[in-house]
Image: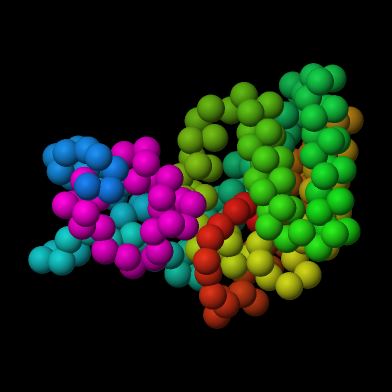
Amino acid sequence: MDAIREAITSGDFAPNQRLVEAELSEQFGVSRAAVRNALVQLTTEGLVERIQNRGARVRAVSLQEAIEITEVRMVVEGLCAARAADRVTEGERSEMREIGEQMQQAVASGDVLGYSEINKRLHALIMRISGQETACAVLGRLRGQNVRHQFRLAMHPGRPSVSLPQHLAIIEAICAGDSEAAEAAMRAHLGSVIDTLPEIGKSQSPRFTTP
């Protein structure tokens, strides 16, 4: 199941792509029963939908749903940023600041994909520092559902230059141990994502990384 989930959340399987049990069984080297069970579980997670008489396919998420998902992320990731500010260690401060420097270098060099990958690492680090396991599980599921719109946002012209100072503000607030500022900075960042999503509603989508 993890391999199929990863293929969906990484963008290897496109929205509305049919998921044929026999093909998945051969691709991942598991039994059809295991594939069937995985598809049932992924349906409950909102990554797959089953169409009567047509089998399973990767569930496509509308723009409105993508906005709603990001609104939920704004609340949950805001909480995690606040908790991270309360728990951050000196070593983690150094790690976060190093990520901030790498993000600046990527933007300066125009490395959009590199910036996006570093961005993903930053969000993952904040989740880890926060110690909020339930929140991390919820966010993992939400990001998986929102994969198509997240990649489009990451590739939107000028987006890295907009999000960079937002991420640096998050980093500085967490490193300063200021939980209120950290939560506010995270919510402001994801509010900016919500504002930008309608602009990229008609762009095309290859692969994804976190906005």
Image location (x, y in percent) of residue 85: 78, 29
Where residue 103 appears, x then y in whole percent?
Answer: 81, 49
Q: Is residue 79 visible from the viewing direction of this image?
A: no
Q: Considering only vertical position in the picture, is 155 above or below 72?
A: below
Residue 94 visible from this viewpoint: yes
* Residue extent of the magenta highlight: 1-25
Q: Residue furthest bottom?
A: 202
- Residue in front for this viewpoint, 97 or 62: 97
Which image quarter: residue 158?
bottom right
121 and 59: which is toward the camera: 121
Between 113 and 82, the residue placed more toward the observer is 113
Q: Horizontally, is 166 left or right of 77 in the view?
A: right
Q: Position of residue 173 (x, y in %)?
A: 85, 37
Left or right: 16 as drawn, with respect to 37: right
Q: Residue at x 22, y 38 (%)?
A: 30
Q: Is residue 15 left or right of residue 158?
A: left
